[in-house]
Amino acid sequence: MDYRKLKDYDIQSDYIDKLTDKEKLELFRSLDDGIQDIADKIWNREANYSEKFMIDWISSDYSKAILTICEKGEFEFDKQHMLDITFINEFKDYKKYGDSVNDENDNPVLSFCVPTFWLDVPCEFLDKWAIDEYIDPDDVKFIESIRVNG
């Protein structure tokens, strides 16, 4: 995959807008409690969520909530799962990423804990977030793969 293409990835138009109502319900029901807490503030009732509310919230507020969490750094890290960014063998400038890089194999691998919201977003968004957060823009062309491990 050419990870440079993720530069323009948009969670709303590239993911949410393409989901069916059934998929939006499934997504809402699978959300981490921290993200559902954001929806609770809008719902503001004791009764269970209505299906209409869940679909509408995913359609209009989900991507805003995820982007706000990322921008403000309002998440914790999942210490049981690592995100591994593997560079191609030809990439020699990986040492600038410090001790987080394992270069014992043929290809250098940059590893760090994933954010707790990792199960609540599509892999393309998680990959884009990791690239934006950790990778020098000039080095994106050297990424061979990005995978969650653990």
Image (cartoon, rainbow, N blue to C red):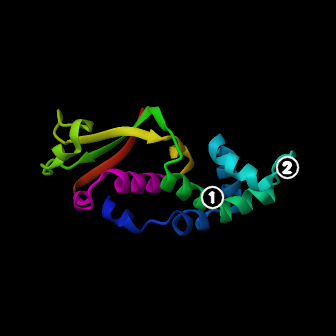
Residue 62, label in figure? 1
**Mark 2, other Cα within 10 Å: few <14 / some 14–19 / many ≥20:** few
Q: Is residue 96 above or below residue 82?
A: below
Task: Give the quarter of the figure containing the C terminus.
Answer: top left
Q: Is residue 139 magenta?
A: yes
Q: Is residue 74 above or below residue 23?
A: above
The answer to whether mark 2 and mark 1 are in CB contact below 8 A is: no
Q: Amino acid at mark 1?
A: Tyr
Left or right position of 13 against 145: right
Residues shaded magenta: 122-141
Locate residue 115, reporting x and y percent: 47, 42
Q: Which residue is mark 2?
A: 45
What residue is at 15 percent from the left and 47 percent from the top?
89
Magenta span contains residue 137: yes
Residue 57 versus residue 36 in the image, above or below: below
Q: Secondary structure at mark 1?
A: helix
Whether residue 73 sits left or right of residue 108 in the image: it is right
Q: Amino acid at mark 2?
A: Arg
